[in-house]
Structures are given as C-alpha cells and as structure tokens.
C-alpha cells in the first residue's frame, strides 16, 4: 500500500474503466487515507473515520466496476449488496448485519487461501510422499535377522522410491490408479426452524456439529493426479493455524473491508403519490443500516467484528429521489458525493478499444479458441458506438451494457458457425454491422430486438 499512491490507483483503474475521473479520484483518496491512518499513533488512529462515498449516476456507467476493481487492486475483502432487497414485502431471513458476516467470510477465505499458498511446498511434498508409499509395496523384512541385510533392503527401497519420485514429478504416472486415505467428518443434517436465521445469531452450526462428530478415514481409489490434489489440500488444511487465520480475517475486515451498497436510492424516503406518509419500510432499512455504517459490533461465526473503519461505497441512479431524501443521520455518514456522467459515442469508442478487457478483444479471443480470426475495422467500431447511443436514446438508458447487446447481435452468426469456419479470417466493417443490424435500424421500436 505504501507504493499504491492515489495517482497510481487511478492509473490502474484507467486500464479497465473509461472516464469517470472524479469517482476514481474520490475512491483513490479514500483508500490512501486508510493507509495513512495506519501510520498514525494508536491514540489518534482510532478517531480517524473512513470517508464513505455516494456515487450518483445512471446504470451502466461504471459505479460497480470501480468498486470491484478497487477491492481487487488493494486485495481487500469486498461484498456487493443491493439495498433494495431489504425492503421486499414479507421478506424473512437475512438482516442488514449479514452484510458484515458475508464480508468476514470473504476475508476468512482470502486469508485461508494465502495460508495454503504459503504451505503449498510442504503440503505437496507430504502428498507426494503419501502417493509414493501407496505405489510402493512395503519392505519385506520377514525372517531378516542380520542388521546389514535389514539396512540393505531399506536402502534399496529408498533408491527405488527416489526413481519413482522422478517419474511422478515428470507426470509419467498421472494416469495410474492409487489407493489413498482421506479424512472426512460426518455432519448430521439438522433442520432448524426459526424466525431468525442461524446466521443472524453468528453461529456456524455446520462447523459446530462437525467438531462434535469424530472424523473418519475413507479409503478411495483415484488417479495419481486427483490423489495429489486431494492429499495436498488435506495436508495444507492440517498444517493451517485456524486461530491465526481467524484473527487475521477479523483484522482485515475491520481495517480494509469494503462494502458496496448498490441501489441506495431505492431506500430513499419519498412521499407517496396518493398523499400518504413516507414509505416506512424504506426508512426502517435506513435505520437498520445506520449502526453498521457509523460503527457497531457484529457477531459473526469467526468472532466479533467492529465496523467503525469499514469503508462503505454507496451508489444509485437517483432518478426519482435525491441524496437529501435519505435520513439525515445516514447522509452524514456519506460525506463524499461524486456524480458519474452519461456515456456518449466518444466513451463507447474508447470502451471498445482501450481497456485491457475491451469487448472487441473479448470476442476476438473467444473466436480464436475455434480457430477463427476476427478483425474489427475502425469504421465498424464507430458504427457500433453510434447504434448503442441511438438505442440508449430511444429506449431506457442502460449505459455501456448496451454495447453487449449490440455486439452480441452482430456476432451471433459468427459465434454459431465458428466451429465450421476454423482457419478463416472475418473482417467486420461498417457495412457488415449495417447488414446485421438493418432490421433494428429500420424499426423504431428497438426493444423488439435489443432487450
């Protein structure tokens, strides 16, 4: 993080997201401030709160992608939730605290994966030894009384073992079957009926029951490749310090966790059209979210997690509401607001050519797997951008997602026929695009063709 400056964070986001510089700068500063906070003295550090962000903009302009790419860039636990899910009529089960439980589970899985990677060399060596023991017959020492003969037979088996090890590492024995022993825990299927889910109590019932039940060994006959994978995983699990992983997962959740609250405008309190009062369910969801955002303790299966320094990034189109329609207490917890701009032809042209995961590049790579080479001409890309803008103008504006629908229509025939056209080079120009989309171009109601 020391070398991940705001400018560098923005540069990394630029590789995948076109435009929206204000939003990129805001999240880059927010993430950098977390590192700066860690450099402070402990007595000051606890008082420095994260500057949560609200992104305002129509769908398909990059709000979710910015948050997702940012979390991947800083290797932070990340969850995305739709705020509107908690307003569903008759909804029972998960409450807003499940957001933090999911975030902690994500952190635990990340740390456990890192732990396994750190132990992989030892685990692979142990798995290799177990496979070799299964492949080699035991040393026959029956009737051997002479110590020299005993040592000779052991040394002979060790030499054979090393020869087989070389063949095993070379992959010569991958298809051979071997009998291995794996540990399995029998967990009884228990159905618990409750108005509140077990997860809301912060109880990991499956692991609790699993720890109560004794593990049993199971012998299986599998190929060497599968045996290596199973035994390596089993060895890494056995070597892992679960208590250490649990503590690190909680620390990461509290210090680097990132929650993306999508559709926050859907829980804004607005006056009903029939003249009635505000929508109580929406305000109730905001009141439930407030303690999580401002800082509280949440009981999870891995321990108690404080949310004081979790970074929350909210997003919404705010077509029928304004940020000021949120309850004042929640507004105050999102001090930074950035507006994301609509995407036009220039942005669509860049989206199809500049990012590392550009759509035209994706389709070209997909067809390359079938032996078909796709070449998008500049005039074709320009025409696709024009049609996407026109479709968004005539219908509901869904931003860059419109490019997916337009490109899919253009590529439909090639995708279907690709296996039979291996070795061909297909050049897609403006005339080709015009031909494939002529029915859509001539029809005023584009929604009949492009959803």
Image (tube, helix red, strand yellow):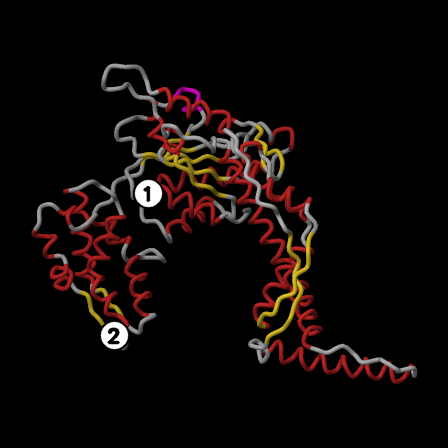
Residue 20: numbered disc: 1
Q: Which label sits in the foreground, 1 or 2?
A: 2
- What main secondary structure does the magenta stretch of the protein show? helix
Q: What span is colored magenta in the figure?
A: 327-332
Image quarter for residue 43? top right
Relative to 14, 381 lies left or right: left
| Residue 412: image location, x then y, percent | 22, 61
Frontmost residue, 419 versus 352: 419
| Residue 365: image location, x then y, percent | 33, 66
Q: Tell me: residue 449, above or below residue 432.
A: above
Relative to 247, 404 lies left or right: left
Image quarter for residue 285? top left
Residue 420: numbered disc: 2
Q: Tell me: residue 266, above or below residue 139.
A: above
Q: Tell me: residue 273, above or below residue 70.
A: above
Frontmost residue, 9 versus 164: 164
């Amino acid at each position: 993080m020391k070398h991940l400056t705001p400018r560098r964070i923005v540069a990394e986001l630029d590789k995948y997201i076109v435009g929206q510089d204000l939003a990129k700068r805001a999240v880059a500063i927010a993430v950098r401030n977390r590192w700066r906070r860690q450099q402070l003295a402990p007595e000051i550090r606890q008082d420095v709160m994260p500057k949560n962000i609200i992104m305002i903009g129509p769908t398909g302009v990059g709000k979710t992608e910015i948050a997702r790419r940012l979390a991947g860039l800083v290797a932070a636990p990340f969850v995305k939730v739709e705020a509107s899910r908690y307003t569903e009529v008759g909804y029972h089960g998960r409450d807003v605290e499940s957001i933090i439980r999911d975030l902690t589970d994500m952190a635990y899985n990340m740390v456990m994966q890192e732990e396994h990677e750190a132990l992989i060399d030892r685990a692979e060596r142990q798995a290799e030894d177990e496979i070799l023991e299964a492949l080699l017959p035991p040393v026959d020492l029956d009737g051997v009384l002479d110590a020299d003969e005993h040592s000779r037979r052991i040394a002979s088996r060790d030499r054979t073992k090393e020869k087989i090890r070389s063949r095993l590492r070379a992959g010569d024995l991958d298809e051979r079957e071997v009998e291995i022993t794996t540990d399995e825990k029998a967990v009884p299927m228990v159905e618990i009926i409750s108005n509140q889910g077990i997860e809301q109590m912060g109880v990991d019932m499956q692991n609790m029951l699993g720890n109560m039940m004794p593990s049993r060994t199971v012998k299986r006959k599998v190929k060497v490749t599968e045996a290596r994978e199973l035994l390596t995983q089993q060895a890494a699990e056995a070597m892992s310090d679960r208590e250490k992983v649990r503590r690190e997962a909680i620390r990461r959740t509290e210090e680097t966790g990132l929650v993306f609250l999508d559709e926050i405008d859907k829980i804004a309190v607005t006056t009903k059209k029939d003249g009635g009062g505000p929508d109580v369910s929406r305000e109730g969801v905001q009141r439930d979210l407030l303690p999580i955002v401002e800082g509280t303790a949440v009981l999870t299966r891995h321990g108690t997690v404080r949310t004081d320094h979790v970074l929350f990034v909210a997003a919404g189109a705010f077509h029928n509401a304004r940020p000021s329609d949120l309850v004042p207490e929640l507004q105050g917890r999102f001090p930074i607001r950035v507006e994301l701009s609509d995407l036009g032809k220039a942005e669509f042209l860049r989206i199809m050519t500049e990012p590392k995961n550009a759509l035209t590049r994706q389709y070209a790579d997909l067809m390359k797997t079938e032996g078909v080479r796709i070449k998008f001409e500049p005039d074709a890309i320009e025409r696709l951008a024009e049609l996407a803008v026109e479709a968004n103008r005539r219908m509901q504006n869904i931003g860059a997602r419109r490019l997916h629908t337009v490109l899919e229509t253009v590529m439909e025939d090639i995708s279907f026929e690709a296996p039979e056209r291996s070795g061909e080079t297909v050049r897609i120009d403006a005339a080709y695009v015009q031909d494939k989309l002529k029915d859509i171009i001539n029809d005023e109601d584009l929604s009949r063709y492009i959803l």
